[in-house]
Image (cartoon, rainbow, N blue to C red):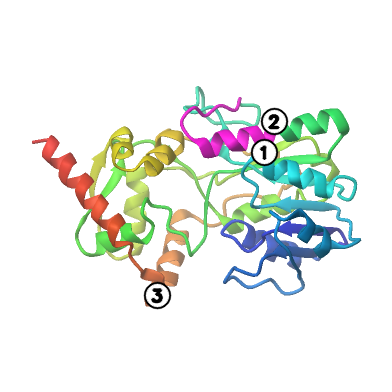
Amino acid sequence: MNNRILFVGGTGIISSACSELAARKGFELYLLRRGQSDRPVPEGAKTLVGDIRDPESVRTAIGSLTFDAVVDWVAFTPDHVASDIAVFEGRVGQYIFISSASAYQTPPQRLPVVESTLLRNPYWDYSRNKIACEDLLVRHYRESGFPATIVRPSHTYDRTHIPLDGGYIAIDRMRRGKQVIVHGDGSSLWTLTNHRDFATGFVALLGNPRAIGEAYHITSEEYWTWDQIFHIYADAAGTTPNIVHVPSDVIATYDARWGSSLLGDKTHSMIFDNSKIKALAPDFKTTITLPQGAREALAWHDADPARRAIDASRDALMDSIIEAQLGAKG
């Protein structure tokens, strides 16, 4: 394996596992970084120092290098993608854009979601920006042959990320016997993907000519209700959850950003058909169950008190929402 790959980023929650696996598989891997992440660069990878928001610093960092694939893990708006095209066009065999499964039709009209499901999210700016990025890339692919591949992760986690609203705050509240908020009635189905499983599917796309001009989602094939997810993490934390159900639109009146992420994503049941990625990555499957992932996360957080810091204002906001919700029920 001698494909030369550039990751813009590469040490985040999703990308860190992809970096480790790509390096282990023998890719010639470069990470373009500003040097601000606490996560280590995997053995065998080379670091280039530059800021993707400063195109001249990127050109200086990469010099005369060309790449079989470039992956931008931190592109969120059409301006970001347009800048990437200007920098990398003519010197990359494949450009992989990290979109989001939240770009799919929301709420979905049918499940499981497939890659041909139309993109529409009227609730969340984050998702609409990702859709606009995809539209720009598709246009450049059609008009000039820019070698784009689109990847749509769903909710992907690692041991450092607890995928409950509030993150570790929810664990802390459960351990203290306090009530926790679950949006809606807790029965919507949700897909959570461990980043190591995601990496197995993703790395198969790197430098793969069959992936150019295509879009893929890469997700777990487990799905759980939100009540079940809270019970799984509570069990890993050695406690039980005292759940208060609060409608997503009510949460949005207290915190617009939190509400948008619910109404534009987590409120709706989302499960996925992974047949397309499996055609290129036959080894891809769910190997890390959510209970295992939850135990890993709690072990990591419990190993260092600094990892269990609490945002007091967020904790107080949850108290206020719960008090109002229980008061409204009489």
Q: Which residues are magenta?
A: 118-135
Q: Label 2 belongs to which residue?
A: 135
Residue type at mark 2 is Asp
The amino acid type found where label 1 is placed reads: Pro
Q: Is residue 168 visible?
A: yes
Residue 317 picture location, percent across and down: 26, 51
Q: Is residue 135 above or below residue 208?
A: above
Q: Does residue 82 appear left or right of residue 169 in this picture?
A: right
Which one is closest to the eye, mark 3 or mark 1? 1
Q: Residue at x 47, y 60 (%)?
A: 161
Q: State which tag comes first along the sequence, 3 or 1.
A: 1
- In the picture, measured across the screen, residue 324 lies left or right of residue 57, that is left
Q: CA distance from mark 1 to mark 2?
A: 9 Å
Q: Whole-percent x and y of residue 6?
A: 78, 58
Dot 1: element: helix
Task: Write the residue at 46% across / 43% down.
Answer: 223
Which residue bears the numbered disc 3? 306
What residue does disc 1 label?
A: 78
Q: CA distance from mark 2 to mark 3?
A: 42 Å
Which SS class for mark 3? helix
Instruction: Name the residue furthest left.
Output: 330
Q: CA distance from mark 3 to mark 1?
A: 37 Å
* Horizontal and vertical percent position of residue 273: 59, 35
Marks 1 and 2 close (CB-CB < 8 Å): yes
